[in-house]
Image: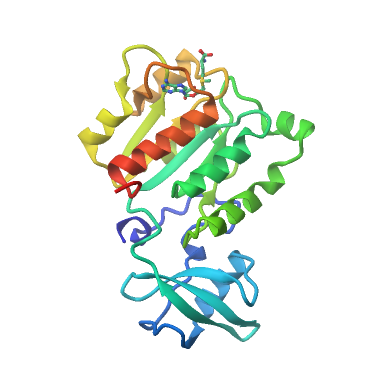
Amino acid sequence: MQGIGRPDLSWPCVNRGGRGSLIRLETVPVLDKELALSPKSARALTFWQARTGQIVTLIDPEDHYCRGRLTAMTDSGASVVLFAQLPGPVESPLQITVFQALPEKERFELVLQKLTELGVHRIVPFQSQRSTTLQERDALQRKSHRWPDVLLRAARQCRRAMIPELGPVTDWSQVMSEAKATQLALLLYEGKGQLGLARALKQTQPSSLSLIVGPEGGFSAIEVAAAEERGVVTVSLGPRILRTETAAIVAAGVCQALCGDLAE
Ligand code: SAM
């Protein structure tokens, strides 16, 4: 369980995602028998807004993933009946953080949903030189308050054991600092002569990486140069210009397929 076992650098998080949302069992489970959950796991259930009768994904002390139905949730504790052991982990050994320049319209909601399904660990919206601002976006739609809920619903639907972390809307310098804390920091750039994403991954075989995705209008030359100066690698997704949300989703899929757990 490389990915979710590593120490957390504790970057700011505006939802109740991350390791705190993992529901861990303290004993090796027996199927179809009611088990009491530890106070820590009972707390994690509140992150999932879980109710009695709901089905959740849990991790046992031997790192096996299982599915169980909550049989009780009270102030004094919670219990569960496990009914299935999953064939393997649902959390990827590859920790992906996606920095997404704030897109317009419903695109960010789509990005949140699909990146959750793809097993991304952390998603951070940011303001770039050519992106919209949160204020402009919310003036039209007022939807940013719904982002944590989009992540929660998607995580439940695809049976994840962890809700991805959502970072606060941040700026370029914070993106650079956070991205540099992962083993490989990649900026998706449609300019000519870039290294292909697949090749960059094969060269490094990272266990943690950052993907920095530009807005509808792309990154400015100044942003690209500044990133390269900080050691961020610019990579291509091929000859076609993808929409920003397509780029984020495709890049995360390629990373999971080559270094993580997609279509193994
Ligand atoms: N400025 C560009 C233009 O109008 O020609 C398009 C920007 S694209 C719609 C939005 C973002 O998606 C880019 O900033 C980049 O991060 C990513 N992207 C799209 N296509 C890409 C490709 N072929 N290779 C790498 N990144 C790509």
Task: Point out the image quarter for the N terminus.
Answer: bottom left
In this orientation, does residue 182 appear? no
Which residue is outermost to the top?
192
Vertical placement of residue 233 versus 11, above or below: above
Residue 98 lies, in percent from the top left, at: 46, 39
Which residue is at a point 40% across and 25% down the rendered structure image?
Answer: 227
Residue 100 lies, in percent from the top left, at: 52, 34
Which residue is outermost to the left?
203
In this orientation, does residue 46 appear? yes
Query: Which of these two is toward me, 190 or 187?
Result: 190
Colouring: rainbow
Vertical placement of residue 164 versus 139, above or below: below
Residue 18 lies, in percent from the top left, at: 49, 57
Vertical placement of residue 115 versus 59, above or below: above
Vertical placement of residue 247 versus 21, above or below: above
Query: Which of these two is toward me, 45 or 71?
Result: 71
Q: How many marks?
A: 0
Which residue is at a point 42% across and 26% down the rendered structure image?
Answer: 188
Residue 12 lies, in percent from the top left, at: 53, 50
Which residue is at a point 54% across and 76% down the rendered structure image?
Answer: 69
